[in-house]
Every structure is written in structure tokens, then in C-alpha cells.
Image (cartoon, grey):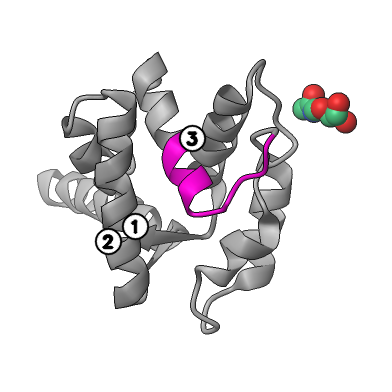
Amino acid sequence: MHYSSLFVIVLVASIIGLCASVKQKKVNLAPDKTARLVQHAIDCVAATGVSPDVLMQFRQGHVGSDDKSQQFVHCLLKRLSLVSKDGHGKTQRVLDLYPDSVDKEGIKKAFDECNKLNGSTPTETSFKVFVCFHKTSPVVIGL
Ligand SMILES: *[C@@H]1O[C@H](CO)[C@@H](O)[C@H](O)[C@H]1NC(C)=O
């Protein structure tokens, strides 16, 4: 009795753990792209005056939604030419970040959905799109 309930708990926990890890696949950026991204990220911390903590948060995929964090994300996406003037993403440029080996159809689907979101400013729009995409994309980029 005790053994079997323990077994069920362990089983459920490992299934949950497994789902969390297979739901989003992680791929690494090509080294030259990583270097470019890091340089832009540092420049954007300076340009927006956000706390440098944002870099670590960004790496872990949890960026705050305060004004400066939003400006940081927008700054970075803009410098990487991933968003247009109005704050919406450039789908093809986003897809180009990923290696050919991943499910680009799935990524495109998730991105197109998120890219419909609108904010009241370009900064807010790109931030919303980014947060949505980070949550729903089948593949996320790790650093
Ligand atoms: C965002 O704005 C565009 C253009 O005005 C509109 O077509 C679209 O439906 C809006 N999206 C949402 C989710 O409201």
C-alpha cells in the first residue's frame, strides 16, 4: 500500500518532469550569432539603463515586464533586425536563427500566432510577441 502510492507519486513526478523537458526543445545559436547577440545585449543594457541582471534573466527566459526590461528586449530584437518599426517580428529573420535540423514549421506556426499580438507602442508590441513566442515555440534558443 505505502509502496504503491509512493510508486505512483514517483511515476507522476517523472512524467511531469519528462513533459516539461520534451515540450520545448532547446538549440544553441551558432557561435558567431551568439557573439553578436551578447555584444548587442551589453549595448542594450547601456542604452536602456536596465539592471545588468536582465542579462541573466534573459538567458533563463524570464524577463521582467517593467518598462526598462521591455525596452531592453525591444532594443535587442531591433538590433538583431528581428522586428520592424511597428514592433512586430520579421518571421523569416526569426526562422533563420534556427538550424535547419529543427521543426521550422512548428516554430513558424507559433510565431505567426504570437505576431498577431498588439501593444500600444512598438516596444510593448515586440515585448508581447517575444514573451508569447518564448512560451509557445516548440524550439527555444539557448545560449
Ligand atoms: C492587431 O492589429 C492588427 C492591425 O490593426 C489587427 O489586424 C489584428 O487583429 C490585431 N490583433 C489582435 C490580437 O487584436
With respect to residue 104, does 107 lie above or below?
Answer: above
Q: CA distance from mark 2 to mark 1?
A: 10 Å
In x, y percent, where is residue 85? 67, 37
Q: Residues within 10 Å of mark 1 (few under 14, many from 20)?
A: some
Amino acid type indicated by mark 3: His
Q: Nearer the viewer, residue 143 or 1?
A: 143
In x, y percent, where is residue 137? 54, 54
* Residue 127 is at least partly visible in this image: yes
Q: Element type at marker 3?
A: helix
Q: Element type at marker 1?
A: helix
Give the magenta part as a residue range.
75-85
Asked if the stretch drawn in magenta spans residue 81, the answer is yes
* Residue 15 is at least partly visible in this image: no
Quarter of the image containing the C terminus? Answer: bottom left
With respect to residue 132, does 32 lie above or below?
Answer: below
Left or right placement of residue 138 versus residue 59 in this view: right
Asked if the stretch drawn in magenta spans residue 140, the answer is no
Q: Residue at x 36, y 25 (%)?
A: 69
In x, y percent, where is residue 124? 57, 23
Q: Earlier in the sequence, mark 2 or mark 1?
A: 1
Q: Which mark is residue 6?
A: none
Single out the mark in the foreground, 2 or 1: 1
Q: Which mark is residue 74?
A: 3
User: Residue tagged by mark 1?
Assistant: 37
Amino acid type indicated by mark 1: Leu
Q: Earlier in the sequence, mark 1 or mark 3?
A: 1
Single out the mark in the foreground, 3 or 2: 3
User: Residue tagged by mark 2?
Assistant: 143
Asked if disc 1 is less than 8 Å from ligand 1, the answer is no
Q: Earlier in the sequence, mark 3 or mark 2?
A: 3
Q: Residues within 10 Å of mark 2 (few under 14, many from 20)?
A: some
Q: Residue at x 40, y 61 (%)?
A: 141
